[in-house]
Amino acid sequence: MIITGKNLFFAFEFYLIERTMTDSKHISLKDLAQALGVSVPTVSRALKDSPEISQDLRAKAKRLAKEMNYRPNPFAMSLRKNTPRIIGVIVPDLVTHFFSSILSGIEDTAVANGYFVIITTSHESYEHEKRNIENLVNMRVEGIIACVSQETTDYSHWAALSDINMPLILFDRVCLTERFSTVIADGAESAQAATQHLLDTGSKRVAFIGGANHLDIVKRRKHGYLEALRANGIPIEKELVVCRKIDYEEGKRATESLLALPNPPDAILAMNDTLAFAAMEVIKSHGLRIPQDIALIGYTDEKHANYVEPKLSAVCHQTYLMGQTACRLLIDRLRGDRTVRQVVIPTSLQIRESSVKDTH
């Protein structure tokens, strides 16, 4: 079961209504009990076909529940049993395939272990992120799986979760690794391999487009890019490194600034799919050929890399496995394992049409 986005607030409202039983718009067990002239435990047992309740009352309770459109609330039910089985998830967005695939891995693993999944989005906002944490804690989720928003530079709201013993697993963009287990891709290694491939296949001036420098994921991938340049004895030119924001329009502006240089790059490594596709659009709009004029490598998935022309060479994540792993770490934590683990999921560099220059 997944509740996403704004529906979280409606679910939480419904949960509170069920608990307090104060809103007549939502039919509760108390409403059924009053209509039947019996106690709440009696009508509850009747709806569950308990042999302790007469067949006549069971039939009346079921008929009335249907007429009044009564629906049991799984959140309230789990809370009454004092064993809530709810996991909260916070992602920056639900639009990209990257996050939706990770969510699939989380959900499948959670459901297989008897948990509901509530998904919220930070919309890359620090304030949204803090509010999502507060809402999930108030809903009494057992644990949280999250990816840090681009705006977040103060991690005190994450640190506070350990103070209240709320289990937290971070993935992709992470922080406070001494406190919380994390699941990340091999950012530095993959960026170094991608940059090396560009150099090995005819490119001379490789640029890097990334997000905000405070993000750990940007630091890792930029480090890999710079290590490849150093390993090949290539001087580092600051104007070839543009790190602003992980955003399509920002990616376009970054590419425009690179192409406007007196000595523009002949290759670009873009640190995620949003930036890679933005770079591709701008390069084409200038009438330049990929890869003959500017080679390009991004970070994306197998499907989307093949949808574009030319087909995009890319570092491919095992996103579903990342989701599975994060959820397994959380479930292990809920079962008493307090070991802090930093799991690195390998990526693979898929060579297609966008990166190999024709040197003949």
Image (cartoon, rainbow, N blue to C red):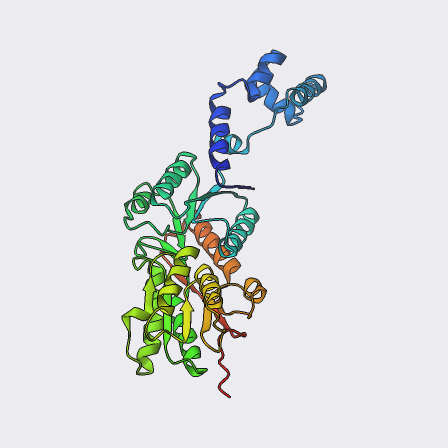
Residue at (29% x, 48% y) in the render? 155
Tell me which residue sits at (32%, 73%) in the image.
Answer: 262
Q: Is residue 50 above or below residue 269?
A: above
Furthest residue toward top: 37
Question: Which residue is more in the foreground, 331 or 263?
Answer: 263
Where residue 215 sits: x, y (%)? 33, 57
Identify the residue shown where x is 44% and y is 83%: 202
The answer to whether residue 46 is seen in the rendering is: yes
Q: On screen, 258 above or below 62?
A: below
85 is higher (above) or lower (below) than 231: above
Q: In the rendered view of the protein, which quadrant contains the N terminus?
A: top right
Q: Is residue 247 visible?
A: no
Residue shown at 46% from the left, 76% from the top: 293
Give the image location of residue 160, x and y in percent.
Answer: 30, 43
Callout count: 0
Depth order, front residue of 337/315? 315
Determine the residue located farthest toward the bottom in the rendered image.
Answer: 360
